[in-house]
Image (cartoon, grey):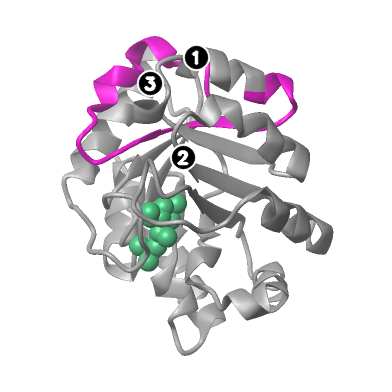
Amino acid sequence: MSLRPQELLLAPSILSADFTRLADALAMLRSAQRCIVHVDVMDGRFVPNITIGMPVVAALRRETEQVLDCHLMIADPARYALEFVQAGADWVSIHQEADPHSHRTLGAIRQAGAKAGIVLNPGTPVETLTDLVGAFDHALLMSVNPGFGGQSFIPRVLDKVRRLDAMRRGAGIPFLIEVDGGVDPDNAGALVAAGADVLVAGNAVFKAADPLKAIAALLAAMDAGRKAAP
Ligand code: DX5
Ligand code: ZN
């Protein structure tokens, strides 16, 4: 039995957008199909870069009703996760590597009214999620080492997606599988065929000459991958 959702989603990462024109980026995404807004939060401790914090998430919230998918690349995410929910995040994802009490933090995110996500770095096996299934709404597999946009895709993630999809079917508990890093139209189909439901794309969208065309190409590749899925 498939536990996959009806609709595949694309999550363009505004980290690759022009920060002086975030409202324009949101307007562009609003006119696109099947897009949510991926927000990369980095603290300079868990990852070697500093980006967006709660005030920017609150500003995005005032500007759009689209789903804000906040990816927290921060140390001690339990300390701030609820502040991101209060700022208006719809989805809040925490790194498994950053929180020894991820089960508790995921529960707190859900209780605060947001969807709770767990994130794995490229070197963290999906089997570390076995006893967490049911406690999260989406699992985000990194296909680059987090910290920067525009890095090269690590193909090993494809096998991780397949193993996580098998885990989902084995448990009989639905959750979304999201993949983040170096996604483009050349690998999007294979990711969806492997079991991914949501793909993050930064540079492939915002550095394209025509972002809406780039989104359409990514979604078309994803749909083709879905048709090819076993
Ligand atoms: C990496 C971030 C990603 C990244 C995606 O640390 O979590 O969301 O911005 O950008 P691309 O698609 O350019 O790799
Ligand atoms: Zn991200």
- The answer to whether any part of residue 223 appears in the image is no
- The answer to whether any part of residue 71 appears in the image is yes
Q: Nearer the viewer, mark 2 or mark 3?
A: 2
Dividing the image into four quarters, tell me where ligand 1 lies. bottom left
* Rendered image quadrant of residue 38: bottom right
User: Outermost residue toward the front?
Assistant: 45
Q: Label 3: state its secondary structure.
A: helix
Pick the residue in front: 220 or 75: 75
Query: Going 42% across and 23% down the picture, which residue do you hit?
Result: 99
- Of the image marks 2 and 3, the number of the one nearer the N terminus: 2
Whether residue 125 is in magenta: the answer is: yes
Q: Amino acid at mark 3?
A: Arg
Q: Mark 3 sits on what residue?
A: 169
Q: Residues within 10 Å of mark 2 (few under 14, many from 20)?
A: many
Q: Is residue 38 left or right of residue 185?
A: right
- Of the image marks 1 and 2, the number of the one nearer the N terminus: 2
Q: Amino acid at mark 1?
A: His
User: Outermost residue toward the bottom?
Assistant: 209
Q: Which mark is residue 74?
A: 2
- Of the image marks 1 and 3, the number of the one nearer the N terminus: 1
Q: Where are the magenta residues, as a range?
A: 109-138
